[in-house]
Image (cartoon, rainbow, N blue to C red):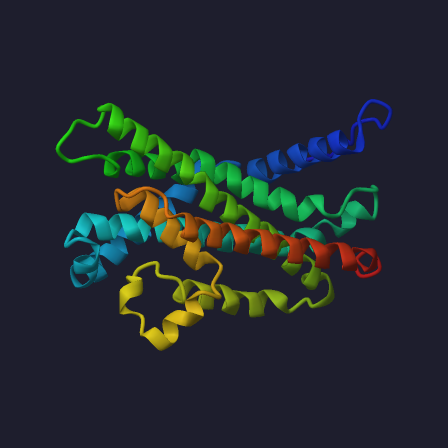
Amino acid sequence: MAISVPARSKWSPVQRYLELLQILVERNLKGRYRGSFLGVYWSLLNPLIMTLIYTAIFGTAFKSYFGGSTVNYMLAAFTGLIVINFFTSSTNQALASVVQSGGLMNKIRLPISVFPLSMIVSNIFQFVVGPLPLLALVTFLNTHDPDTAYWAPNNLLHASVNILALFIPLLALSLVCTGVGYLVSALYVFFRDLPYFYELVCFVLWIGSPIFYPVEIVPPQVKQFLLFNPLFPIIESIRQLSLMNEMPDLGLIVHALANGVVLSLIGWGCFRAWQNQFMDLL
């Protein structure tokens, strides 16, 4: 797909950047799902299938940690899976984005930072049309007083607050992925064997996140290291909002958001500091 940059006389730098970002996101999505039957909904099918597998294997053993309900365990596993899938998919795609676009950037003068960002935004779009509506529905159904109807004013208010609050840990997730995406895409320009190492990093984050197991079974001496996992407070805050029929835990949400802001600043800072050296290596 050809990329045409808007005329400079008609657009401000910000408008040109956003226009280019939109073009790249559309190109990413069309190229990824051209000829696909389900299209962007593959991003929903994968966690659903994995949820069924985890439930079949671990549901009976771990349901006591989720109110004795296999359904609650299944929903908890689903929320963990959509977070880790979003992280691994978006950051792995961002990792190779600068190097893969080297030929294009040698022909046209383009802002380098738009390429990793376009991968993150593409995955955000997939999440919004795929897992997010289902997550909002789960939150609505779980957030109510069991003695009253779903449409009772108090239930609607509580559900609305929790559904809106979901966007804060999801914003934190987007910031974490953006920061990591910028960092690994910059490092890959210098270290071409980075994907092999990053695959190990993603595995450590997956096994170190309470996705298919409850955090209560983690030994205390190990649990303290979970605080260094940026996905841990995101997963726990989403579960607290969508499954536990409670008002938002501000401490958990702030922890998730703080991690996202810090990682996005670190990733962007490193990318900006190193990008002047990119063209010599592409």
Observer-nearest residue: 106 or 227? 227
Q: Is residue 154 left or right of residue 5?
A: left
Above or below, comparing residue 228 to residue 110 in the picture: below
Residue at the spot 41% in from the left edge and 47% down from the top edge = 250
Q: Is residue 117 left or right of residue 109?
A: left
Q: Residue furthest bottom?
A: 221
Q: How many marks?
A: 0
Residue at the spot 14% in from the left edge and 54% down from the top edge = 68
Q: Is residue 66 left or right of residue 256?
A: left
Rendering coords of residue 234 (x, y %): 43, 52
Rendering coords of residue 124 (x, y %): 52, 40
Task: Locate the C terminus by quadrant.
Answer: bottom right
**Image-quadrant location for residue 198:** bottom right
Rendering coords of residue 137 (x, y %): 31, 34
Task: Locate the N terminus by quadrant.
Answer: top right
Q: Is residue 33 left or right of residue 179?
A: left
Q: Residue furthest right?
A: 9
**Image-quadrant location for residue 194:** bottom right
Q: Is residue 138 visible?
A: yes
Q: Is residue 32 visible?
A: no
Observer-nearest residue: 179 or 51? 179
Observer-nearest residue: 215 or 145? 145
Residue at the spot 68% in from the left edge and 66% down from the top edge = 192
Rendering coords of residue 188 (x, y %): 68, 62
Above or below, comparing residue 114 to residue 196 in the picture: above
